[in-house]
């Protein structure tokens, strides 16, 4: 009853607030006489404590009428995102979020009774990673207790009451009954016990505001984003020069339709401006806003279920609109922008349902992923008759069904591509923030065979593509034409499943390379015999009216042809001249190539040829034996020549550097031109830190330090004093 009452009040209250709290900013603010006037605060947990009183007999299925109590004590993790809305010092709504629990007692087990050892094994194993989660308003229960990493729900909570003390800024949740969840009951082997009450829970939390709005007749007059206590100091994020949109979180994923043997998914995204300049967010038909592709990957196969890393789904692009000004990334939001810009340090959320809205999605084919350019009609749906999967993250049910994919691991990925970062980079060399726009988050998959649910595991990994989650693989970044086109990643992994047999697995991921990839050729050493040759690519959308592909035919899904010669094996799709819609490795997609061999690995150079323009190039991998570098498949004559970078003085090496932080740790991207040797020496603060191949002319220095720092770099032809000028990178003004 409490939940229904609170939900009804929440919806009616939020309807009066117009565009302040959900991403419906296109709606006008209400200015009626009954619209609210006052101070609205969005608050999260600063600190707190949680107590669970459990009955061991009930948990363990005993029929005894005498309870065996055990009490678990936890602290709430600082700055837990369990938000509530407080209007004029009165609690008005609790929003979806979670609070991580930290066990509290000398033994570190979170219990104060000897009965701890008789807790069910699954619960005992998860005590160090439990969380209380507030569910969405339309969920069947309001609160659950789950494993924060696996998503497994142990208890549903019912009968609880919310109270808020405005003077103490204290939120209390009391009277909650702990009911065994259906999945916990099944895990215990007692499905009939689902819904049985086995204890109670109480929560007390000190709250702190993250956003304070002043409303007059429902219209926002001012917004303040107070800094979180404990968030300042040397570890506080440092905004980078220029606009810099990143994916700060991928909090949830859900199924929104099906069509035959495929399902259509949406992935929730929270974007954050990591730059010190406001980022343009102008809605269509204006073309100066981010577009958002969504991807799904699966890691599976082999003894450890991490032999291969494959893309199993992709969506069209969500076109961003109406930026909110939150502080979800804790960058220290500086409000003051209209909804047509995302202010420095601020965040903007899109739910999975919004990102699955078919009429808000446009084809990837319209967008140049490096420059971010696209036409104003890039999401024209005239003539479309949508199915349940159209334009959404489309995945085959066979790629999700847990019975067909035992122990597989799944990763959702999203990327924000914007023309503003590119134009800023052109006018402000050295402030180019176009290569950190992808992030990923692990999810578990349950259900099937036709309907699936997804639970997040751990935290979102920011500013990194999902291919970097491939366990045990070597993944290198490649930039074939710095300044004129984007980047892609070469991943490979070699395993030895049986004596005398080596499995070679390759993955090519195109992050934002407009020219795309047309062929991949691997050299084979003399006498190497290969078998079990394989290829995998993600599902493609069918052709749609106004989809930006040639003659609106859609991109081909034809598997790549494979050619085996005495010293090489080559996979290729058609050239651009043969078929503009060929199944090339376009931006935001990952393709796999594999085989078994009877020879162990050696480091060699594979050859990659491009689809639209550009000469073939070598990339380092491992392959059976040595062998000569194979002759690449010819590429098409380019239809357009990119504007070249200025030619440096003959013999001069030019170096550029860009510093940024990932999870608070310092990194520096280096790129150079003009070197003449095969290898390059890289110096940081006059100390040699690496010697790398001159191709592709790019290197990332994972410094790993936090806070402030100053570093000088130069690169030289290996073993010589033919070097670039020194370039300095500073973090946090240090």
Image (cartoon, rainbow, N blue to C red):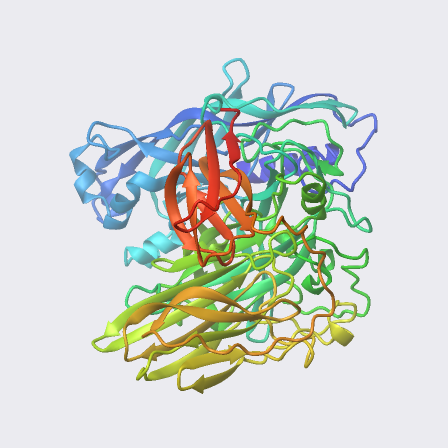
Viewport quadrant of the N terminus: top right
Residue 347 seen by the camera: yes
Spot occupied by residue 156 in the image (x, y as percentages of width and height): 42, 44
From the viewer's perspective, is 323 left or right of 615?
A: right
Spot occupied by residue 282 in the image (x, y as percentages of width and height): 77, 43
- Can you name the residue that lies furthest to the top here? 167
Spot occupied by residue 313 in the image (x, y as percentages of width and height): 55, 65
Residue 449 seen by the camera: no
511 is higher (above) or lower (below) than 684: below
Residue at 62 percent of width and 33 percent of height: 241
Residue at 40 percent of width and 31 percent of height: 77
Q: State the residue in front, 455 or 712.
A: 712
Q: State the residue in front, 225 or 42.
A: 225
From the viewer's perspective, is 26 left or right of 394?
A: right
Q: Say which quarter of the image contains residue 545.
A: bottom right
Q: State the residue in front, 277 or 219.
A: 277
Residue at 31 percent of width and 75 percent of height: 625
367 is higher (above) or lower (below) than 405: above
314 is higher (above) or lower (below) than 103: below
496 is higher (above) or lower (below) than 433: below
Spot occupied by residue 263 in the image (x, y as percentages of width and height): 57, 67
Q: How many marks?
A: 0
């Amino acid at each position: 009853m409490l939940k229904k009452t609170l939900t009804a009040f929440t919806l009616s209250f939020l309807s009066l607030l117009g565009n302040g709290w959900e991403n419906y900013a296109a709606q006008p603010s209400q200015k009626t006489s009954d619209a609210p006037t006052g101070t609205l605060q969005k608050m999260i947990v600063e600190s707190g404590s949680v107590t669970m009183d459990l009955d061991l007999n009930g948990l363990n299925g005993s029929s005894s009428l005498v309870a065996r109590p055990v009490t678990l004590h936890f602290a709430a993790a600082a700055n837990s995102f369990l938000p509530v809305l407080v209007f004029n010092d009165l609690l008005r709504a609790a929003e979806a979020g979670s609070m991580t629990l930290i066990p509290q007692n000398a033994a570190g087990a979170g219990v104060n009774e000897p009965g701890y050892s008789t807790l069910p094994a699954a619960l005992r194993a998860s005590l160090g990673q439990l969380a209380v989660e507030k569910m969405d308003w339309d969920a069947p229960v309001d609160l659950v207790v789950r494993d924060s990493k696996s998503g497994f729900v142990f208890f549903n909570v019912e009968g609880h009451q919310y109270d808020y003390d405005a003077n103490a800024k204290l939120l209390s949740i009391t009277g909650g009954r702990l009911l065994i969840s259906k999945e916990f009951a099944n895990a215990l082997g007692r499905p009939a016990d689902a819904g049985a009450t086995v204890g109670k829970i109480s929560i007390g939390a000190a709250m702190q505001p993250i956003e304070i709005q002043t409303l007059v007749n429902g219209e926002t007059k001012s917004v303040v984003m107070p800094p979180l206590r404990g968030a300042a100091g040397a570890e506080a994020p440092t905004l980078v020069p220029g606009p810099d949109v990143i994916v700060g979180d991928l909090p949830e994923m859900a199924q929104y339709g099906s069509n035959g043997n495929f399902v259509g998914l949406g992935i929730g995204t929270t974007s954050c401006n990591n730059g010190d300049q406001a980022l343009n967010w102008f809605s269509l038909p204006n073309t100066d806003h981010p577009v958002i592709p969504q991807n799904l990957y699966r890691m599976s196969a082999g003894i450890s279920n991490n032999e291969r890393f494959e893309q199993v789904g992709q969506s069209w692009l969500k076109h961003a609109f109406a930026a909110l000004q939150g502080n979800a990334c804790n960058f220290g939001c500086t409000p003051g922008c209209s909804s047509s810009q995302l202010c420095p340090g601020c965040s903007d959320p899109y739910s999975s349902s919004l990102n699955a809205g078919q009429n808000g999605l446009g084809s990837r084919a319209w967008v140049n992923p490096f420059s971010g350019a696209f036409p104003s009609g890039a999401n024209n749906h005239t003539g479309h008759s949508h199915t349940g999967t159209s334009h959404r993250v489309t995945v085959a049910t066979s790629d999700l069904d847990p019975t067909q994919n035992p122990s597989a691991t799944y990763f959702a990925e999203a990327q924000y591509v914007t023309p503003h970062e590119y134009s800023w980079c052109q006018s402000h060399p050295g402030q180019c923030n176009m290569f950190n726009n992808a992030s990923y988050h692990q999810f578990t998959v349950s259900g099937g065979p036709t309907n699936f649910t997804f639970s997040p595991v751990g935290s979102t990994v920011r500013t990194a593509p999902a291919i970097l989650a491939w366990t045990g693989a070597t993944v290198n970044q490649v930039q074939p034409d710095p300044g004129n086109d984007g980047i892609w990643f070469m991943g490979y992994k070699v395993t030895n499943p049986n004596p005398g047999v080596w499995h070679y697995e390759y993955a090519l991921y195109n992050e934002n390379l407009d020219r795309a990839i047309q062929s991949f050729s691997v050299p084979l050493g003399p006498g190497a015999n290969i078998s079990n040759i394989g290829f995998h690519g993600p599902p493609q959308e069918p052709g749609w009216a106004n989809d930006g592909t040639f003659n609106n035919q859609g991109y081909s899904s034809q598997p790549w042809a494979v050619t085996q010669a005495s010293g090489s094996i080559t996979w290729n799709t058609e050239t651009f001249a043969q078929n503009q819609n060929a199944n090339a490795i376009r931006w935001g997609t990952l393709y796999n190539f594999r085989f078994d061999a009877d020879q162990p690995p050696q480091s060699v150079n594979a050859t990659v040829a491009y689809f639209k323009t550009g000469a073939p190039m070598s990339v380092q991998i491992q392959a059976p034996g040595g062998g000569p570098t194979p002759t690449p498949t010819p590429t098409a004559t380019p239809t357009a020549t990119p504007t070249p970078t200025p030619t440096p003085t003959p013999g001069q090496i030019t170096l550029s550097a860009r510093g940024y932080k990932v999870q608070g740790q310092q990194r520096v991207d280096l790129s150079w031109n003009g070197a003449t040797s095969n290898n390059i020496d890289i110096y940081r603060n006059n100390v040699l830190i690496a010697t790398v191949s001159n191709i592709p002319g790019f290197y990332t220095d994972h410094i790993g330090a936090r806070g402030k720092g100053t570093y000088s770099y130069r690169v030289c032809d290996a073993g010589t004093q033919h070097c670039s000028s020194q370039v300095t990178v500073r973090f946090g003004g240090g």
